[in-house]
Image (tube, rainbow, N blue to C red):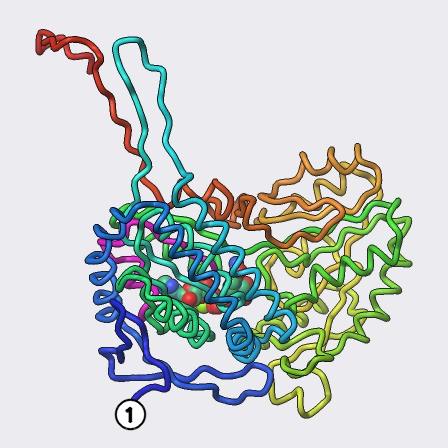
Amino acid sequence: MSADKLMYIGGEWVESNSGQDFESDNPATGEVLGTVPRGNADDIAAAVAAAKHAFPAWRDTPPDERGRWLLKIAEALREHAEQLAVVLAKESGHYLGKAQGLVEFTAQNVEFHAGLADKARGASIPTGPGRLAITRLEPVGVSGHIVPWNYPLFLITRSVAPAIALGNTAVIKPAEQTPLMAIALAEVIDEVGLPAGVFNVVTGFGEEAGAPLAAHPDVGSITFTGSVETGQLVMKAASAHMAKLTLELGGKTPVIVFPDVDVEVAAEVAMQGILSRCGQVCIAGSRLLLHDDIHDQVVERLVERFSQAKLGNTLDPDTQMGPLISQEQLERVEQYVEIGKQEGAELLVGGARPSDPELQKGYFYLPTLFGNVTSGMRIAQEEIFGPVLAVMRWSDEDEMIRQANDSPYGLAAAIWCKDITSAMRTATRLEAGGVFVNEWIGEDFKAPHGGYKLSGIGRENGFECIEHYTEVKHIAISLEAEKAENWCDAPL
Ligand code: NAI
Ligand code: MG
């Protein structure tokens, strides 16, 4: 029996060599949305071969023309925005309004990276009067992209758009929770007519399809977003053939609130940080560091407002917060809530699944607030990836910095503070790849994104991503008349 949707390899829609399919479900309802092929190492090999075959012609396509292909893809994303947003809402649990915004964000992301195609450039290096030394940025070849389920559309383009803009071809392994989103994107790209083999999608599970992609000797660069444990496996696999590697592995973002901030504003931003996308965001503001002077007032508002958040079907216009992605993720959140209680944190609100039987068909969990959290607790140290906020208090600035940096992660940090000197002093002292001051930026693809410590290696977005998708070639040319040195006097 054929799967409902097929994978996309070398411009063709294909079944898996495994002969097996798997289901993708709606996390808000438990309903099966469709079946897709269960890709394996043979399918990865076929996709890498297709990408390798397509590479020379794509590399040699004039850069402005490559950029125009990406602009066409961005336009097509907009033309199909409504249908893509529905897939995103149904399969990954973003409520529809958010999903629509994310499709537009994705189109803009593709446009930004389109511009890199003919703007990423090398340098000329002053090595002395007798020589012209230049660098040339060349594409790496086949790029591999292992993508998670939390932003299953945007996170494909975040890495694939710069990769193909810069002349690489791409093999994508979407998360097993969200294969239909990747296929929907492939349908748009197929309709645009991008040359066959430039963009390939193999649907499947991590160990069966992700691992062989990371280990494939013809894959020159790997971009991975997901858990630390899997990131470490990918890194090991990539080391066998020295693939370039970008790892974005999540975090434990501190949201630091100074005493000069309005308590209503503080409550709003705390909610934005942790409840948007149900806490399943790499940069989720999962630690709230409140100054003593406003601590009680902000907590009081949060208790009230957490209990008012509207959970519901992602297609319902009233919904403010969707479900967790899976039963596995739900159980993980439940376990952490138990851990928090055992550690002595005070459960202030939430801490359970909603009682509505309609919501119990999906993987919903109530917005959950823990007070009296101390930095050493596991709920303050480990990434929960759910709507669970750990509140800590501070009075001394040095102590607050120590708390904020007391984390194995270092992806992002947020500061709310009217006094510019305190805000900027704090920003420079935090161990984080991104610091937002008085604004919950989330992610801006024009600026670099990536983490310190366990949060990963390398930077995506901005001009910083160029390094990952190009090799730097140094070409040294003598400007002097032909001359031969005594062979044994060679400088090295
Ligand atoms: P995961 O890291 O296992 O999965 C992410 C991607 O890696 C998926 O496409 C998966 O199929 C693939 N994968 C899994 N095992 C692999 C392997 N051995 N080799 C190559 N690829 C493999 O993350 P998972 O299980 O979905 O979620 C677990 C936790 O990871 C979450 O609770 C959260 O803490 C973190 N996470 C962080 C994300 C972020 O945005 N940084 C995104 C998703 C998860
Ligand atoms: Mg996993």
Percent position (x, y) of residue 246?
A: 42, 49
Q: What residue type is labelled 1?
A: Met
Tell me the quarter of the image containing the N terminus: bottom left
Q: Is mark 1 within 8 Å of ligand 1?
A: no
Local crowd size for mark 1, using a 10 Å CA cut-off: few (<14), some (14–19), many (≥20): few
| Magenta segment | 207-225
Q: Mark 1 points at which residue?
A: 1
Between 202 and 50, the one nearer to me in the picture: 50
**In this rendering, would 371 be left or right of 230?**
right
Residue 348 picture quarter: bottom right
Is residue 297 visible in the rendered image? The answer is yes
Percent position (x, y) of residue 465?
A: 45, 44
Q: Please report the residue visible at 89 percent of the width from the left and 52 percent of the height from the top.
A: 262
Between 155 and 343, the one nearer to me in the picture: 155
Between 303 and 203, the one nearer to me in the picture: 203
Residue 139 picture quarter: top left
Residue 426 picture quarter: top right
Percent position (x, y) of residue 488?
A: 10, 10
Q: Please report the residue visible at 33 percent of the width from the left and 50 percent of the height from the top.
A: 221
Q: Please report the residue visible at 60 percent of the width from the left and 43 percent of the height from the top.
A: 432
Percent position (x, y) of residue 110?
A: 47, 56
Magenta stretch contains residue 220: yes
How many callouts does the rendering have? 1
Secondary structure beneath dot 1 equals loop
Tell me the quarter of the image containing the C terminus: top left
Is residue 327 visible in the rendered image? The answer is no
